């Protein structure tokens, strides 16, 4: 389990600098971390090993952080911790499923679950974590259950829409942004909403938190698209270019494809697109594709799109009072986009 100093360093990396707020969040995250560890325990040895696999690998715990942080706008109750565990378990469950769909070999610096136990066990482990999240969520009341179910539906629909791809006549970039809103924005919005709900926030504040969370989620994933190209395995815990190898649509490639189709892309873009659309199963071919896309102006354009969504998330906070919690929410939004800088 990550300790207090680790949590404090993580919080400071988000740009949160208010000492009293840092102390409350650090304590809260330590409690959430232990609760997550407890939640994935099982009497079955296989379920215990596979269910705790990604928990032991670490992670930024962004969703629990936003839940705890949003709760500081009101008077947090003990239910905030349970809500933070619900959103983190839900997120972890989606990672098990996503890694199977994407044929990923690494996550958070360790082999993915399907690399260790196979696809079937990995999928069932994700299902198990969804069940654990639902059990804890049931203790939060009917409204929380409804919100979690609606969020889960959006997560699944987003995955389906991504798998099927844009329909005839649908703009691929707009389709992708819709996918990100469902797959990432929905759960991050619910994280912030739960924090507000279980601290007595009024409906107007909850609406602000939902709008903020949706935009933060899209910014977060767009930054990940760029990180898939710019970071190395040590930094990200993933093999660079994993999405490229599996031909998973990401913003840099979609923008490149749009530019080539419109005739506005720089010289050499068509050849790069042909490389990206080809067989990247060979490590040398993948490395060449990553290197060339890194150097292409479209990657910086994709980073700017991530920054735009982060800026919109900050702007969504305007109705809230100018207090340390609001400033911390803004700092988190910017920090998540700045990862791709």
Image (cartoon, rainbow, N blue to C red):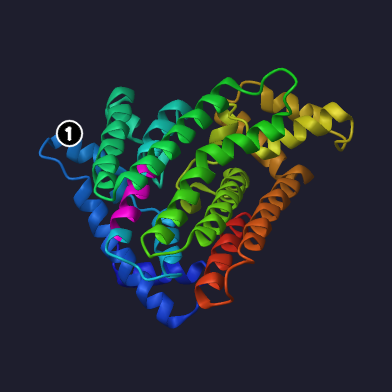
Residue at 42% across / 39% down in the picture? 106
Residue at 72% across / 25% down in the picture? 170
Q: Quadrant of residue 228?
A: top right
Q: Which residue is mark 1?
A: 46
Q: Is any atom of residue 146 visible in this view?
A: yes
Residue at 58% across / 60% down in the picture? 333
In the displayed image of the protein, which residue is found farthest to the front?
203
Q: Is any atom of residue 341 visible in this view?
A: no
Quadrant (top left/top right/bottom left/bottom right) for the N terminus: bottom left
In the rendered image, residue 88 lying in the magenta stretch gets the answer yes
Q: Main secondary structure of the magenta part?
A: helix
Q: Is residue 62 above or below residue 124?
A: below
x%, y% of residue 158? 53, 31
Q: Which residues are magenta?
A: 81-91
In the rendered image, residue 246 lying in the magenta stretch gets the answer no
In the displayed image of the protein, which residue is found farthest to the top?
168
Q: Nearer the viewer, residue 318 or 226?
A: 318
x%, y% of residue 3? 28, 67
Residue at 27% across / 27% down in the picture? 121
Q: Mark 1: give few (<14), some (14-19) or many (20+) Cα within 10 Å.
A: few
Q: Quadrant of residue 24?
A: bottom left
300 with respect to 136 (left or right): right
Determine the secondary structure under disc 1: helix
Q: Nearer the viewer, residue 63 or 82?
A: 82
Quadrant (top left/top right/bottom left/bottom right) for the C terminus: bottom right
x%, y% of residue 319? 62, 66
x%, y% of residue 85? 31, 52
In the displayed image of the protein, which residue is found farthest to the bottom?
19
Q: Nearer the viewer, residue 84 or 165?
A: 84
């Amino acid at each position: 389990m990550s300790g207090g100093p680790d949590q404090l360093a993580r919080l400071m990396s988000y740009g949160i600098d208010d000492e009293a707020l840092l102390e409350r969040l650090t304590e809260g995250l330590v409690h959430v971390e232990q609760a997550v560890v407890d939640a994935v325990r099982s009497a079955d040895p296989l379920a215990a090993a596979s269910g705790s696999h990604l928990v032991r690998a670490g992670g930024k715990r962004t969703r629990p952080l936003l839940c705890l942080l949003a709760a500081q706008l009101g008077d947090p109750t003990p239910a905030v911790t349970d809500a933070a565990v619900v959103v983190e378990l839900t997120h972890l469950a989606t990672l098990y499923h996503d890694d199977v769909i994407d044929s990923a070999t690494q996550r958070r610096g360790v082999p993915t679950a399907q690399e260790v136990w196979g696809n079937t066990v990995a999928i069932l482990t994700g299902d198990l974590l969804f069940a654990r999240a639902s059990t804890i969520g049931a203790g939060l009341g009917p409204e929380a259950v409804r919100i979690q179910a609606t969020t889960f539906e959006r997560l699944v629909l987003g995955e389906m829409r991504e798998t099927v791809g844009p329909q005839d006549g649908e703009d691929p970039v707009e389709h992708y942004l819709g996918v990100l809103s469902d797959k990432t924005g929905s759960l991050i919005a619910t994280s912030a909403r739960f924090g507000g709900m279980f601290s007595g926030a009024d409906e107007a504040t909850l609406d602000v938190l939902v709008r903020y969370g949706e935009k933060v989620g899209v910014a977060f994933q767009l930054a990940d698209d760029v990180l898939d190209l710019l970071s190395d395995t040590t930094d990200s815990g993933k093999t660079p270019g994993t999405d490229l190898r599996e031909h998973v649509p990401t913003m840099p490639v979609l923008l490149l494809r749009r530019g080539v189709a419109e005739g506005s892309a720089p010289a050499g873009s068509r050849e790069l697109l042909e490389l990206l659309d080809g067989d990247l199963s060979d490590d040398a071919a993948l490395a060449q594709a990553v290197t060339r896309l890194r150097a292409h102006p479209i990657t910086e354009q994709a980073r700017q799109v991530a920054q735009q969504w982060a800026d919109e998330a900050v702007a969504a906070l305007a109705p809230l009072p100018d207090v340390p919690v609001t400033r911390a929410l803004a700092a988190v939004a910017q920090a998540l986009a700045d990862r791709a800088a």
